[in-house]
Amino acid sequence: MASLHGSTLEAIKHNHAQLLVQWVAALEANGATRNIKEQTLSQETRDFLQLLIDVLQADSGNDIVSSDWDEARRFLERLSASRAQLGHDSHQAAYFIFALKRPLFSLLQTHFSDDPARLAEQLWLISELLDTLGMHTIRTFQKTREAVIKRQQEELLELSTPVVKLWDGVLALPLIGTLDSQRSQTVMESLLQRIVDTGSEIAIIDITGVPTVDTLVAQHLLKTVTAIRLMGADCIISGVRPQIAQTIVHLGLDLGTLTTKANLADALKLALKRLGVNLGEQV
Amino acid sequence: MSGEHSGSLPVRIEQDVVLARQLARKLASDCGMRLVDLTKLVTAVSELARNTVVYGGGGDMDWQVLEEAGRTGVRLLFRDEGPGIADLKLALTDGWTSGNGLGLGLTGARRLVDEFELDTVPGEGTRVTITRWI
Amino acid sequence: MERIPILRMGEFLLVTIQVDMHDKLAMRLQDDLTDRISATSARGVLLDISALDMVDSFIGRMIADIASLSRLMDARVMVVGMQPAVAITLVELGLTLPGVSTALDVERGMQRLSQHVRRP
């Protein structure tokens, strides 16, 4: 592969200051500087141009995946993360790179004005390089955003799965709303973990607030009961609605070990009785 | 970006089953797989690696860390040049066993992963590919 | 030769599995344990698997077999400390170990065993 001509690099180094001014101007003209301090921007552009010059000087080729480009790549990863935090979109983040094209192109145009063949070759190389760097910025930007979304989803799931301690040794999981397969899985897993963490011997899953379940979720519910038994604790399901009872029966699963109670209060009573807690007559 | 993303591990003797499990655990945990999913994958590996040793007369486990369309996963291929499986339908029935196991090896492993592919020719060998996504 | 230790605690035996078990080790444990039950007339066995991060159908079968064998020798087996991820996986695998008693940890397992043994 053809590499950048030595004089291209010289030209960039010589016109360093002018390039920076034009670059920043291009960024501002395109609204890619929103909420960014002037000082920060000038620091960023200066740093990156220097990184670029350093790598090109080392004649490392255009393969930005290679280790010579490590620092430049990392710089762009940090940049896109900071842009994401500022609420910029991926275009604005990538424009940081693309805005450098015009100043560089016009520089080369002047520099190689009497050698059109070389000009074309050098333009192509620079263009290709900047495109790859820009794409890398977009990719990392999207990855950052995806990570943020994923974390928020997980936080939401956590919020909707409160495992509460009803008594020493008794945990309850009151489920409310429609259960999809993903949510039921998260909920059940966090219940199992809490059983271990708290050393609770009885877990009550209250499904009074669940209007209906599909077969997958019903199956999951029964699997959870079995898993809890394997761990050495007991599980009581309370508040089974007629419709859910139908679904479970249609599954044709073995209900031999399943303990159910009409409501949470009855389930708690049974749990306390099993633990040998005596509350007197009024309960 | 660094490190290997595929490789192979011999699965010849019983101790190799333990090594296969350990490798699968490391691959999955390096990808950030959740503990429950990781445990399911490792258990499936244990079943299939044992099948490779006991029924396939030994073979290999090819491993691969996948990154495609924004998702990450672990894919494992168990291959042997053993007698193969004559009646595939029967072998994939819960509780059926040709040896002295519980008959949950193949069917159980299938339930523990996201993708399961079985390729067998009687007299030539068996290849089982499993994938678990994150 | 590699072996899983079996400790005697009064009328019970305690087995703590702490290694990544290969099949031969599991088979050996089964033999050793039945020998020890017979030699000590133990009334119960605590099988602590809290350190096991995986139970496949082979180890699952070993546990079920140990439970049945012990029962025939008048000792009750209590499996204690199964990790949540292991329990979920076992259920998914289709191995629910019916007839095997379980407890959250060694202390509770011991309690349950004692209650059981005291019962006529």
Image (cartoon, helix red, strand yellow):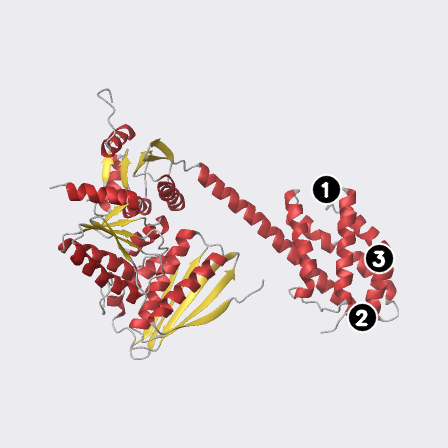
Callout in the foreground (1, 3): 3
Instruction: Pinpoint residue C118: horizontal percent, then vertical percent.
Output: 15, 41
Query: Which element type, helix, strand or loop, lies under badge 1?
Result: loop
Choose between B20 and C72: the one closer to the eye: C72
Is mark 1 in CB contact (under 8 Å) with mark 2?
no
**Chain of the residue under the numbered disc 3 shown in the image:** A
- In this picture, is C8 found above or below B75? above
Q: Residue at x 28, y 40 (%)?
A: A235
Q: Residues within 10 Å of mark 3 (few under 14, many from 20)?
A: some
What is the CA distance from the residue labelled 1 to the residue labelled 3?
Answer: 24 Å
Instruction: Pinpoint residue A195: horizontal percent, then vertical percent.
Output: 35, 41
Mark 2, residue position = A5
Tell which circle, 1 or 3, labels the residue nearer the N-terminal end. 3
Instruction: Pinpoint residue A23: horizontal percent, then vertical percent.
Output: 79, 52
In the visual, does B66 lie left or right of A201? right
Instruction: Pinpoint residue B123: horizontal percent, then vertical percent.
Output: 29, 80
Choose between B122 and C114: the one closer to the eye: C114
Tell which circle, 1 or 2, labels the residue nearer the N-terminal end. 2
| Three-letter residue code for mark 2 | His
Mark 3, residue position = A16
Q: Residue at x 81, y 56 (%)?
A: A103
What is the CA distance from the residue labelled 1 to the residue labelled 2?
Answer: 36 Å
Query: Which element type, helix, strand or loop, lies under badge 3?
Result: helix
Mark 1, residue position = A34
- In this picture, is A18 found above or below A235? below
| Three-letter residue code for mark 3 | His
What is the CA distance from the residue labelled 3 to the residue labelled 2?
Answer: 17 Å
Query: What is the count of numbered marks?
Result: 3
Q: Which mark is residue B18?
A: none
Q: Residue at x 83, y 60 (%)?
A: A106
